[in-house]
Image (cartoon, grey):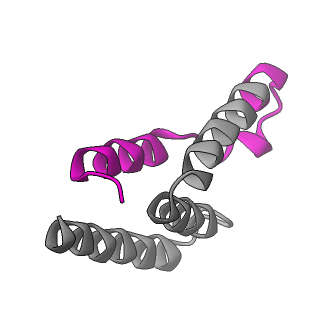
Amino acid sequence: MPTLEQFDAYVKDLNQHDWSYEMSDDYSVWTRGRDARRVLKAKAQANPVFISSFSAYEKANIGFSTDAQVKRNAFIYDLRKTLVVTL
């Protein structure tokens, strides 16, 4: 189980990631985005809480649906509350 600080740092990284990198015409932007996504996914695979967060961000950013992003934010908020209670 990650600490609250670790969870917050990971969610911050997810928020700052350029989820639209695949649509870039610039190969260097695409490469940086791909590499950053790999790092985020590798961190997620080491922790079940992180994999849930990564999946929520990945799903919410497919098509960039506002409704999906609202659901993602609610999921992350609930997940964070769970961490606070268990710590």
Would residue 38 be found to the left or right of residue 49 on screen?
A: right
Instruction: Count up the numbered dots.
Output: 0
**Residue drawn at x 33%, y 72% as measured from the top left:** 79
Range of magenta residues: 1-30
**Residue drawn at x 59%, y 66% as measured from the top left:** 55
In the image, residue 75 above or below residue 8: below
Would residue 36 be found to the left or right of residue 7 on screen?
A: right
Quarter of the image with the N terminus is bottom left
Measured from the top left, where is residue 47 in percent x and y? Answer: 51, 56
Q: Let me know if residue 13 is in the magenta part.
A: yes
In the image, residue 72 above or below residue 42: below
Quarter of the image with the C terminus is bottom left
Measured from the top left, where is residue 85 in percent x and y? Answer: 15, 74
**Residue drawn at x 64%, y 48% as measured from the top left:** 41
Measured from the top left, where is residue 3 in percent x and y? Answer: 26, 51
Q: Quadrant of residue 32?
A: top right
Secondary structure character of the magenta stretch overall: helix
**Residue drawn at x 34%, y 53% as measured from the top left:** 2
